[in-house]
Amino acid sequence: MIQNDTIVALATPSGAGAIAVIRLSGNDAIDLVSDCFQPVTSNKQLVQQKTHTIHLGHIVDGQKTIDEVLVSIFKNPQSYTGENVVEISCHGSPYIQQEIIQLFLRKGCRMADAGEFTLRAFLNGKLDLSQAEAVADLIASDNEASHQIAMQQMRGGFSSEIAKLREELLNFASLIELELDFSEEDVEFADRTQFRELIDRITFVLKRLIDSFAVGNVIKNGIPVAIVGEPNVGKSTLLNALLNEERAIVSEIAGTTRDTIEDEISIGGIGFRFIDTAGIRETQDFVESIGIKKTFEKIEQSQVTIYLFDSSKGISDLKAIKLEIEKIKNKYPQKPLLIIANKIDKLDDTQLASLQAAIPEVKLLSAKTGFGVEQLTNALLNLINTGALRNNETIVTNTRHYDALLKAFEEIQKVKHGLDSGLSGDLMAIDVREALYYFGLITGEVTNDDLLGNIFANFCIGK
């Protein structure tokens, strides 16, 4: 997969804008741009300029001036890709962008594939594989928490932890392999007590990283929250209040929401995806019944469920409401459930006291006036374990990493069992090598073209 040609791509979003950045990378990148660049203040060629410098001038195609630009030079190996890199900041006209790109294609450049700049950074040793994947996560981050995790991983927090464990395990693996060469002398180079301590330490770290995926995955992808309840209890009004916009149709007519409505907001740096569902009731309406079926599907898919009921109907309905709450709890015992009494602006103090006595865990809300919305968002945040995030601990968000960690953990358990049962060194070495393989998959010590192709195909072109 190592390429020596020079690639070019637009590094900023396509379309019109104030400026656009066109990026080139390859051994000939500076020479190619130098041939088409006329500096304003210096007669020096770009190849004679120092690395990490910016130059004002014009991009020209023969006698035709295309644009006045700023050219930034990054000479290998002090560049993002580890090759010569040039970034051209031009005016953001789509016509100018295409003229410049087409010019360099005619000069011998090739259009970059998706993620090829970052792929070259990995192949040239500027980033390990988990750091390269963090680049894509950083670009895709849409809230504070996902941004923080991606930044920590891109700085090498996760990979350095894995690399340290792998190095220690590799040292012991070498000693065990050495014992096999002296099997007839019956010598033991690897101290089994120290080896057991290392295996226990690796087990502890792997379990922590594996457990962190439960938090990391929902932070990265957003936490789905289903808002459920009977028709006309204010589910759509609550969604609008949370989003601070008229996202869902609000009507006094029961059954207005017949399909699920979804939207995302960030609360305390965490992304939440709220799902307004069709009201749950017995109905003869075919279309509404499909919406109710979807409601139960969304509860199944959600991480958190909000059960909303109309408190203004009076205490007489509380028995039926409690039965409905128990039904949801029994059907989804592992799913966090927030019970919200809406329309409390219509209740007096006596009715409020009766309501809270009947359902002690209830939270009070008036979606119409906004009362209780902040308390609800705080309750949602409290359900999410962000302690690791606040303590800047490593959190796993990547499914590929999670899968490799699970397999490494399985192999480490085999090694531990082998130590406890006095397994011979040659058999134990097989399990150690397997564990090392899965560690290497994470950081990129072990790769193949298919793996790299799958990872970098998800990047945007120009990164």
Image: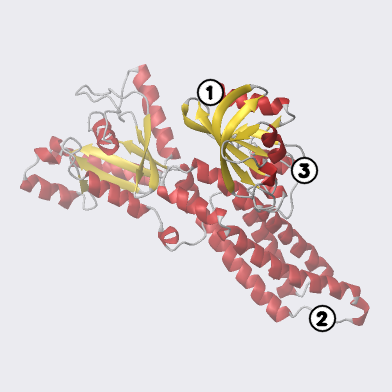
In the shown orientation, is residue 358 left or right of residue 266? left
Q: Which residue is nearer to you in this view: 353 or 1?
A: 1
Choose the circle earlier in sequence order: 1 or 2. Answer: 1
Considering only vertical position in the picture, is 443 above or below 10?
Answer: below
Identify the residue position indicated by label 2 in the image: 188
Identify the residue position indicated by label 1 in the image: 94
Could you give the CA–CA distance between mark 3 and mark 1, rounded to whole angstroms? 31 Å
Identify the residue position indicated by label 3 in the image: 2
- The residue type indicated by label 3 comes to Ile
User: Is disc 2 surrounded by few (<14), some (14 to 19) or many (20+) residues within 10 Å?
Assistant: some
Where disc 3 sits, the SS reads loop
Residue drawn where x is 48% and y is 46% of the image: 220
Could you give the CA–CA distance between mark 3 and mark 2, rounded to whole angstroms? 42 Å
Q: In which quadrant of the rendered view does residue 325 lie?
A: top left
Q: Position of residue 185 (x, y in %)?
A: 91, 82
Q: Position of residue 290 (x, y in %)?
A: 40, 23
